[in-house]
Amino acid sequence: MGSRPIVERRSGRSSPEQTTPSLKGLAAEARAQYAALVDDPALGSRPDLWCQAELGLALAAEADGDLPEAIERLTYLLAVLAPLDEQQLPPMAFEDREETEHRIGIALALCRCLREVGDLSASVNIGEITFTRELPGGWTDRGIELGATLLAAYIERGEQTICRALAAQLLEAAEQLGTPRALRAACWNGATVAAIDGDASLAADLGERALAAHAHLTDPRSTGRLRARLAENLLIYCPAEHARARQMLLIAQQELAGSAASAIDLGYCQLWLARAALLAGDVEAAARQAEEIATRHPAALNLVADARLLVADTLRARQQMQAAAEVRTTTGEQLEQMKAPGRASRAFADSAAELEECGEVEASIRAYQRAMSVGDLASY
């Protein structure tokens, strides 16, 4: 990397617990080591190494499940390298390709973390600004990965029209580049967009292309995440394939456990295994696992919302309609705060249907009205 101005370093120890021997796991160990490195006074004269250490500490915090800490550090780092109030960086900023790729990587991680805590507006804002200003020289693998991360935020917001356009743009660019990384990123979330559209054939084709691209890469974490996402698509859009999805998830779980996967990655895999259990008829196991996941990852609001909706599904399976409706209403309010109108609207509409089934007609009408006021049901 090229030289940067010396910056005031932040302490790597935001809390004493970060470096105590009681921390468990590889992520915690990496976090402690990066924190010690960031606190090394000698790093003050090497801003390039300081930047790498700060990013390493932020990613270790994310892997350890501490999303607020990761967001704080990534935001600070991005503010040093590329202030968000400057929509366009100086032309000379793009002369060093490695510098540009590094800025994109920081923005990508921040976009992802913001999505997981439920701040979808901020996630989209970071992604859009970086997407616009960092790619004046054309597409790169990292640029397409940023686009795919932005696409994931649009998917969560239920903006299917934008999703289709961006997915097509990313796939075209990836095919032009022809690299495994680019094809993996473009096909990964493109498969989800196709599945939401009801195009099972295209979703399957893109999923297979993404896995084929993975065969050329040595990245077990991404392989596990991709396999888990494809299994999720099966559970949601082809529920009769739940046994096949479960086998895919078990493989993905092993891949993630043997990699540098984050606690959130593993949480999603466990959640989808719980959904597979529900579809297989094991309601008790599904409910127990969903409750555990929601409790274990309180900062990951996106994951918590999915877990709470699964809890509502288990209550519905037990014919506890009013309880299910209450859980959906609370979750819908959370999704509304997260600026995910499509998902919030669907939660309120499902709540209305359950209230109607248990004879709460007036409450059902209010829930339907709320669903329509929040967002367009047909868009999600």
Image (tube, rainbow, N blue to C red):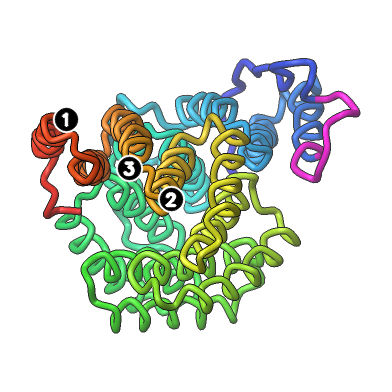
Q: CA distance from mark 2 to mark 1?
A: 21 Å
Q: Amino acid at mark 3?
A: Met
Task: Look at the image and tell me in which quarter the N terminus lies.
Answer: top right
- Residue occupied by mark 3: 321
**Mark 3 packing: few (<14 Cα in 10 Å), some, or many (20+)?**
many
N-terminal of the pair, mark 3 or mark 1, is 3
**Mark 1 packing: few (<14 Cα in 10 Å), some, or many (20+)?**
some
Across and down, in percent, residue 223 comes to 59, 69
Mark count:
3
Report the span colored magenta.
Answer: 19-29
Q: Is residue 171 left or right of residue 215?
A: left
Closer to the camera, 347 or 86?
Answer: 347
Q: Where 281 falls versus 335 (above or below)? A: below
Q: CA distance from mark 3 to mark 2?
A: 8 Å
Residue 316: mark: none
- The residue sitting at the front extreme is 359
Closer to the camera, 1 or 320?
Answer: 320
- Residue occupied by mark 2: 318
x 77%, y 37%: residue: 28
**Mark 2 packing: few (<14 Cα in 10 Å), some, or many (20+)?**
few
Q: Secondary structure at mark 2?
A: loop
x 42%, y 32%: residue: 82
Q: Is residue 159 left or right of residue 314?
A: left
Q: Quarter of the image holding residue 7? A: top right
Q: Is residue 155 left or right of residue 292?
A: left
